[in-house]
Amino acid sequence: MKEFFKNWGVFLIAVALLVVLRLFVVVTVSVKGHSMDPTLADGQKLVTFQLSSIDRFDIITTQEPDELDKIAVKRVIGIPGDKVEMKDDVLSINGEVVDEPYLKEFKEAFAKDKLQTEYKYNQSFQAVADRALTFTNDFSYEVPEGKYFVLGDNRLISKDSRIFGFVDESMIKGEVFVRYWPLKDIEWLN
């Protein structure tokens, strides 16, 4: 038996450690849909870290409050205690204007042709964009304790806290930290 552990012990420990990491710390997910365009695209593969503390602007995976069996990828905009407001496409958190550089590409496309070129793959998205006056509709929310306010980066079509409400801390599955597929798009996130 000593000979077995001498020869295979390190390998078995490494395998056990990988299994524990995979089950309880690091989880892979696939992006489904277009709510995080252009930051994340449909079909991309991500790795999340389940033991992260969550902060503003982190990209996370979470259960959707109205469909608990669905996992969504969203950006945290408001943390517990925050007052988040959107007025004329300008985000304010606790009274301070906040820049959202990750929206620049789509905001410019919206200003150019209301995203009609970008949304050519979906007529209903084109119709929503055509009717929109701003890239992000105005809103104002106070985030309760133990809750988070999340949005998709593709604000015109994203199903997020504006629709399903605040995300409870217990629903958050992890923080996205790397996109690993497709290989040409490998990138550290957050």
Image (cartoon, rainbow, N blue to C red):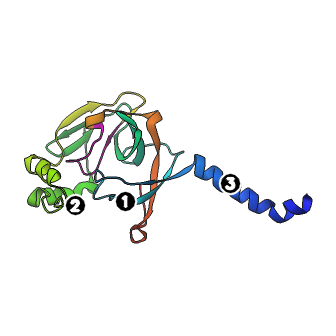
Give the CA distance from mark 1 to mark 2.
20 Å
Label 1 or label 3, whichever comes before in sequence order: 3
Discs 3/2, front: 3
Residue of label 2: 105
Q: Give, as a single range, the part of the protein colored magenta.
A: 149-161
Residue of label 3: 17
Q: Quadrant of residue 84?
A: top left
Does any portion of residue 63 appear in the rendered image?
yes
Residue 68 picture location, percent across and down: 41, 35
Give the CA distance from mark 1 to mark 3.
29 Å
Which sits in the foreground, 37 or 148?
37
Q: Is residue 137 magenta?
A: no
Q: Does 47 sit above or below residue 51?
A: below
Lateral position of residue 111 relative to residue 162, left or right: left
Residue of label 1: 43
- Residue shown at 31% from the left, 32% from the top: 165
Tag shown at residue 168: none
Please say if the residues under marks 1 and 2 sit with CB atoms less than 8 Å apart.
no
Residue 54 picture location, percent across and down: 45, 43
